[in-house]
Amino acid sequence: MIAALHFTTLVVTTIFAAAAAVFVNWVLLRGAFLLMRPAAAGRAANKSAQGGSGRAAGGIHLVSGTVQVARAYAGRR
C-alpha cells in the first residue's frame, strides 16, 4: 500500500513539474517574440515627426530615423 502511495506521489509530482516547465517555456517564448518585434511605433504614430510618409509595407509607421538609416544603406548594396 505504501509503494502505491509513493508511486502516485511520484506521478503527481512529475505531472506538476511538466506543467510548470511548459508554462515557463511559454512565458520565455512569448518574451522572445516580444523582443523580436520590428521597430514599429504602431497605428497612432505621428507622421510629421518622421519627415515624410514613413510608411512601410502593410501600413506600419516606422520609428523616427529608420527610414533615413534604410536609405543610407540602400545605396551600398
Image: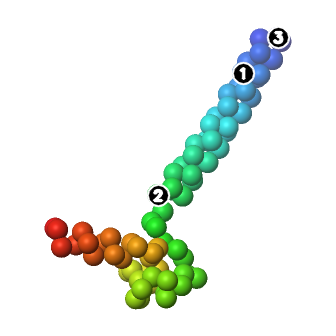
Q: Which residue is mark 3?
A: 2
The residue at 57%/52% (across/down) is 31
Is residue 53 placed above or below 9 in the rendered structure? below
Amino acid on which disc 1 is placed: Leu
Image depth: mark 2 or mark 1 in front? 2
Q: Which residue is mark 2?
A: 36
Q: Residue 6: give x, y in percent of width and height.
A: 77, 15
Is residue 30 placed above or below 60 in the rendered structure? above
* Mark toward the start of the polypeptide (2 vs 1): 1
* Mark toward the start of the polypeptide (3 vs 1): 3
Q: Which residue is mark 1?
A: 10
Amino acid on which disc 3 is placed: Ile
The residue at 57%/46% (across/down) is 28
Image depth: mark 2 or mark 3 in front? 2
The residue at 73%/27% (across/down) is 13
Q: CA distance from mark 2 to mark 1?
A: 39 Å
